[in-house]
Structure formats: C-alpha cells, structure tokens
Amino acid sequence: MQELIQAVYNNSDEKTALGQLVGTLSVSGKRYFLRNEIVQAFADYCQQYQKPAYFYHSSVLGKLIQRTHEILLLDDSIWLLVRPWIASQQVWRLTGDLSSFEQQTVKGWLDARDRTVNRYQPQILELDFHPFYKDSPAIDDPRNIGQGLTFLNRYFCEKLLTERQFWLEALYRVLQRHQYDGVDLMIGASIHSGNELSQQVKEALKFLTTLPPDEPYEKFHTQLQQLGFEPGWGNNASRALETFQLLNRLADNPEPAILEAFVCRIPAYFRIVLVSIHGWVAQNDVVGRSETMGQVVYVLNQARSLENKLNEDIKLSGLEFFGIKPQVVILTRLIPNCEGTQCNLRLEKIEDTENAWILRVPFREFNPKVTGNWISKFEIWPYLETFALDAETELIKQLGVRPNLIIGNYTDGNLVAFLLARRLKAIQCNIAHGLEKTKYLFSDLYWQEMEERYHFSAQFTADMIGMNAADFIVTSSYQEIMGTPDTIGQYESYKSFTMPQLFHAIDGIDLFSPKFNVVPPGVNESVFFPYTERRDPNLRSEVEELLFTREDYRILGYLDNPKKRAILAIAPVTSVKNLTGLVECFAQNQKLRELCNLILITGKLHLSEAANSEESGELEKLHYIIERYRLHGRIRWLGMRLGNAELGEAYRTIADSRGIFVNFARFEAFGLTILEAMFSGLPTFATQFGGSLEIIQDGENGFHINPTDLEGSGDKLVNFISKCDVDSEYWENISERGIKRVREGYNWRSHAGKMLLLAKIYGFWNYVYQENREALLRYLEALFFLLYKPRAENVLQQHWHRW
C-alpha cells in the first residue's frame, strides 16, 4: 500500500482531493468512520466537486479509498486501516497537513482506538497467538483459506516424498493407535515399524488377490491377523484389497487423492459428542429458542447424518461382524422449569436414529431462580466450567468410555468442548454458527457500555480460547472466515481488536492456519423437499388453511385476495433478522403491494410474549408499521411455532401459488431457511450480507438483495414478479435451478463424510505436532483462569441478586 499512498502524495490534485475529503469528514464532528461511511463520503465529494466519472473508481485516491475500511481522526493525524487484499490489514498514519505518512504497528492502532473513547492506558495485557503458529505450515494464498484439508493432504504427501522414513513411521504410529474398547484395529502388536508395515502390506496384497472378491471378512480375518493386521480393512476381500492397495500406493507414490481415499476408510471414531448448551435443545416442536433455532436444527441433523455415516463406515470396514455400534450424543443443559417441554429429561432419543441421544446435564444451582430456567446466550458464562466437569461424568456414564471427537457449537459450546477435550484427550472441532462480535457495531471498543446487557468481555475471550484450541474449525461459508473484498469476515475480526482497559488482541487468530475448513450443511430431505414431489393431502389442506384463512389469536391479519402471489419470510423476531425492514420495504412499494401478499412466520406475535427488550422492541415496530401503512388485507403474520412437517409444507404451499421466499437479514452467517426454501422450490431472495453470497448465484438460481436499500430491494422483487407474469416459465426455471443447487452442493451425507475425514486427518496432524500444540493449550488455560473466569464471576454476582 505504500506505493499507492505515495502515488496520492505525488499527484497534487489527488493529494488536494484527499485533504478536502478529510475536511468534509471532520466537519461532521465524528472521529471514527467505517467503510460504508467512507465510500459514501467519497462519492458525495466526487459529486460536489464535479470530479470526472473515472475518479471515483480508477483514480489512485479512488483505489485507496476502496481499500480503506476505517478512518480515525485523532490528534491532528489521519489513521487509515487499509485492507490491500482479503486477510491482510495495514495501518497508516498521515499527518494532518499531509506532509508525511508512516506505517504503524497493530499496537499503535489499538492504542489510537482506545484514545478515541478516552480509555487509553500505556500498560495493557496483550494477547498474541502468532508464536504458536509461526513454525507450523500455513496456507499462502488467501483464496485457499478454508481449504485446510486439501492443504494438509498435499503437505503430508510432499513430506512422504521428501522425508519418507519419518512420515512412514508417523503413519504407522497413528494406525497403531486405533482401538475400540481396548481391542486393536488396523495394525496389531506384531508389526513394529513403518518399514515392517510397508513389507506386510505387500504380503497382505498377495494373499487377498487369491480370494474371491465377495469373500466375507469373517472367513479370512484369521489369516490377516497372522500377517499383523487387525479388523478394519474391509468387509470383504474386494474392499480389503482396495484399502491395502491405497496404503501401498501411498507409501510408494503419495498423492493427495490417494491419501484422502485411504484415510476415509480408517475406522477411527465411534463415540462423538456435539455440544450445544444454551439452546433449549429438544424435539417435538421445541427445536430451540428464537436466538438458537437454527443451531438446534443444525445439530439434530448433524447427529443423524454422523450416525448414518458411522454405521455405513463400520459396515464397509468389516467391524459390524464384531458388534461394534457408533454412539452420538448431543450434550446440552437440563432445564428444570421446562415450560411443558422435554428439556427437563436427562435423556431423549433422537428421532430416526439407532443410537443417538440428547443428554441433558443441569447447571449447578447457585441461584436456582436463575439456573432453574432457560438462560440467554449472553448470560450463560458463569456455569460453563462446572457444567463441563459434571458433563464429563455423565458422558462417560452414558458412553461407557470417553468420546474421541467433541464438536462444539457457538461460543459457549466451543468453550465447553475445549474443557472436555483437554481432560478427555479428544479431538476438538469448533463451529461458531455466527460470532456476535461482528453483529454489534463497535462491540469491542464500547464493550464497557454494553457489558451489563451482553457481557462481551467474557464472550470474546471465550471465542479466542475456543477457536485457537480447536484442532479444526468448520464454517458454512468462506466469507464467514474472510468476508468479501468489501467486508471483514467474522473470524477475521478477531485478528486484531481492542477491549479498552482490559486487553489488546495483537494477533488473535491465524487466518492462514490449515485448521479452517468450509463444510456447508444440508437440509433434512425427509421434511424439506420439492413441491413437485408426492405430498400428504391432509397436511397440505391443513397448512393452506393455516397460511391463508384460519382465525387464531396467534395469527394477525387476513388477506383480501389469498390467490395473489405470496412473499414468505420465516425468522425469529430479532433486529438482525430485520423483519421490520422487510415489512417496511413491502409497505413502501405500491406495485409490490398490488402484486403480492406478505406472509410472516415467527415464533411470537404479542408484546407479552417477548423474552427481552430487543424482542419487545421489534414486535412493537412490526405492529406499528402494519398500522401506519394500513397493511391489513395484504399481510398475514403467524406468531406461532410450526412443527417440521408443517414448516416444510408451508414452503411447498407458497411454491404452489408461484410465490417467493425472502431473507431480509442485516447479516446472515449462513441461513438454513435459505436452503430449505430453495430446495422446496421457492425462488429465493436473500441478504447480500453473509453466507447467501456463496449459496446463491445471483440471477441464476436465486437473487441477492440489499436490506439497507428498501427501494432497490422492492424494485428487484417487483421486476422478478413482473417478468414471471410475462414469461410463465421464468418462475419454474429459477425454481428448478435452486433445487439443483441445493441437491448438488448442500446435503448432510456429504457433510458427515467430510467431518469424519477432517477428524481423522487432524488427529494425524496433532500426533506429529504434539509439542507445539501443548504449549498453545497451556497458554489458553492461563487465559481461561486469569481472564475469562473473573469476567464470568462478574456475571454470577449479578445473577445472585436476581429476584
């Protein structure tokens, strides 16, 4: 960036323009400006000073402004946070008179940010994780971030070629460790080294080629054991032969595809725990509170898919003969005051599974008026350490032995996964579903003002502990890690930030670490399927009545013309989901009101149902907008929780009338409802801020909309509907492409296979890099006890005084 800034300084016109732009910013009285404000201010400047059209985009100053994400005006200096490319940030300080400029350190930038809120202190705790990653292999191309598995496969194969003896020995040691309840798998005690393994593989190949391909494993397992090989190679001679051939080829001529194919076949994981603590986890029409609904649906589907995949792998590896069965547990909290749900039951079988369960462990009482009830994700921090200790006992009681893979969900689940994995020596996976830091503007800088309500000091500390402790991190999209050229990603926001008077994160996470992997979820195809497939006529009739005509105290509004195309939106009532924005967009566009009805499905309708001030505020706004614009006759608002079957049929019913689905969120980390709607056959319009950028190819199988531009979004909806009215096949074409997109790219079977493969590869990785990882984990333990626990105890003190 130095060359770019120097070019601005060298051009008197552009340097003058920069000074004038800074002058217009300073007139506002503000000192801190974010990218949207900066870009808009530059556009206004170009218009005011009648700059030629190219100046905004193509001038040197224009290029600098497009890469500038923050500007800070402080002490007669101009600070720029510049992002030359994705995953790279630089800080530059320009003197107020533009006589000179100089690159600054991260520490200098964070100090400057603290000064803007008058909370600078010269000595502050600095968190820096760089030393723990600097000697580890790293991805060098930002475009490959999130493809850690591909990177490690290639890295391992290169090492097998260049350091064959060391890596062959490491591979032997990893295979030798595989057991099930003390019984050896894959390799027995008679093979003592990597070289012996290589030799015995060749002997096994000679033997297996003499057998009929369909010879079952139980008929030749004794001969393989005599060669030093225990169960796990295959359920018949053909499968076992293929597995040995893969290992033989891997040792002689390693290639990434061969390594992945071989590792896929290793039976390594039989007992898996998914941690989802705060989310009101149950079935039978419970499925989470409004703030956790997507997370609970995710973990239930993931549990089913993992058990299915484990059963399939066990059968193919020949272990079914020995009676080995997988166990999958969703670990959550038991809630005594469960409001008529099953959230007070210790154990609940997960539907459509053989041996997958919801295991609930109560929080220790402390103040029972708090711990006896559901606790918000912002308030849960004091109870996680003791929960982890109690959960360890309950898990071993339920599983019989320790689990070997623990998958955390959300900040609290990831912290507990860290505590459990550390004690149980299990592989840890981190899944965020959405990091709160990017959802609340300046939530780090103004954490003290927000602390009483949100307790971000505990949460952001827990985030850093969880994401750095994880053996691997799974995200649903690339942008979740890195954002876009215009926006900083959720994980990227943890690279460096300040919590004034508490700590500075100098280097909070290594974005180029191969631990990051994009593994999108799928949809439950037994519930959400295309409207063209066979359906239950009774359910169809019931849902049609519910959506269009039924009278109920939980339903607001009637439709003057129920046969008009419907715009469907399904979301909890939160400010981030922005249903108020959608209703206002609909209300302000006369043509849209003429063409369509608007149907909202939320969990709540009445102000009395609000669980917190945010919900009550959003509910009040929705009612106000409906009354202000007199939308009665054009809107139906279902403030009730629909069961999965009804919800799936609701999508299909709207598709029957050639309607559309809209996600109008201010930000959507991924968006399962987007997948559900598309797979049901509904043309889908989804926010351009978040994961939908990767799900939807704009104009091809869906559409992106800008929820901050009500007029533009309304016009885009009208244009689509008008085009459908002219061309009857247009709606069907978008519908079919959406179904195809989800079917091919977003399914739970593929997700489960990738998750297990990741666990196996990262287990190998940890074996090779044990010492480096232990130092990191010790550092994280220190942060937990010295930084996190005092913040969590502050929350506990508040809870002691409630009621």
Image (cartoon, helix red, strand yellow):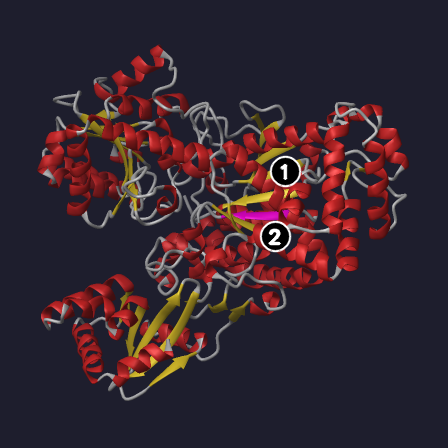
- Label number found at residue 391: none
Amino acid type, mark 1 = Ile
User: What residue sits right under mark 2 in the picture?
Assistant: 471
- In the depicted structure, whether residue 463 falls above or below residue 541: below
Answer left or right for 112 relative to 329: left
SS state under label 1: strand
Where residue 639 appears, as percent x and y from the top left, is 28, 29
How far separated are the C-alphas under marks 1 and 2?
Answer: 15 Å
Where residue 468 appears, as percent x and y from the top left, is 56, 58
Instruction: Identify which residue, 35 or 13, lies in the foreground.
Output: 13
Magenta-colored span: 427-431
- In the depicted structure, whether residue 325 falls above or below residue 521: above
Answer left or right for 291 relative to 687: right
Q: Quadrant of the C terminus?
A: top left
**For residue 429: magenta?**
yes
Q: Residue at x 84, y 27 (%)?
A: 220
- In the depicted structure, whether residue 207 falls above or below residue 463: above
Please rate how many residues cluster around mark 2, counting C-alpha atoms within 10 Å: few if below 14, some from 14 to 19, many from 20. many
Q: Is residue 373 visible?
A: no
Amino acid type, mark 2 = Asp
Answer left or right for 432 relative to 671: right
Instruction: Identify which residue, 671 or 751, lies in the foreground.
Output: 751
Q: Is residue 461 visible?
A: yes
Whichever of labels 1 and 2 marks the residue nearer the N terminus, that label is: 1
**For residue 136: magenta?**
no
Magenta stretch: helix, strand or loop mostly: strand
User: What residue sits right under mark 1 in the picture?
Assistant: 272
Please rate how many residues cluster around mark 1, counting C-alpha atoms within 10 Å: few if below 14, some from 14 to 19, many from 20. many
Q: Quadrant of the N terminus?
A: bottom left
